[in-house]
Image (cartoon, rainbow, N blue to C red):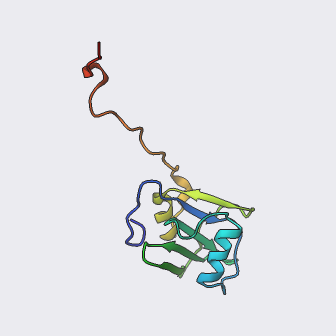
Amino acid sequence: MILGIPARPGLRVMVASKPVDFRKGMDGLVAQVAQVLAADPFAGDVFVFRAKRADRLKLLLWDGTGLCLVTKRLEAGGFTWPPVQDGAVSLSPAQMRLLFAGMDWTQIAARTPAPVRPLIPPQNLQKSP
């Protein structure tokens, strides 16, 4: 779960690598997602934005009924951010939870989903004549 929203299969968490003007609200960040990240802000993915100060972040996400904008400022220390560059960095939902908690998310690797296994073992399948 990310902020009470279940992590669905295929959920993307995208961190905008460059800091954004934190005076931007929901509409400004929606434009940033569409123009800079070339993504659909209404697809249900989570978009993370950083301020110039390392202790602040904003999350933008569509929960199915409307846009949500979450702002967090750490009281001490700073978030672990990817290097400043153009584009975005993708995180797993587990890495996103660590980032939001102010922990170092770089210590765990993003996992790929396990391969889908057939329900019936191949040796038990009957071959047609």
Q: Residue furthest top?
A: 129
In percent of the image, x 66 and y 69: which residue is there? 34
Residue at far bottom of view: 23
Q: Is residue 126 left or right of residue 55?
A: left
Q: Relative to residue 101, is residue 90 drawn left or right?
A: right
- Which image quadrant is residue 56 in? bottom right
Residue 65 on image: x %, y %: 42, 77
Q: Residue at x 64, y 73 (%)?
A: 50
- Where in the figure is residue 71, as x and y percent of width and height? 54, 81
Nearer to me, 116 or 97? 116
Whole-percent x, y for residue 36 in the image? 71, 67
Q: Give the quadrant of residue 80.
A: bottom right
Looking at the figure, which quarter contains the N terminus? bottom left
Tell me what residue is drawn at x 53 percent, y 70 percent: 42
Count of numbered circles in the view: 0
Query: Could you tell whether 88 is left or right of 42 in the image?
Result: right
Q: Which is more toward the observer, 48 or 9?
A: 9
Residue lying at 38% horizontally and 38% vertically, measured from the top left: 116
Residue 3 x/y as whole percent: 41, 72
Figure quadrant of residue 88: bottom right
Q: Name the quarter where the C terminus is drawn.
A: top left
Report the front residue among 110 and 74: 110
- 77 is higher (above) or lower (below) than 80: below
User: Seen in the image, is 101 located left or right of residue 90?
Assistant: left
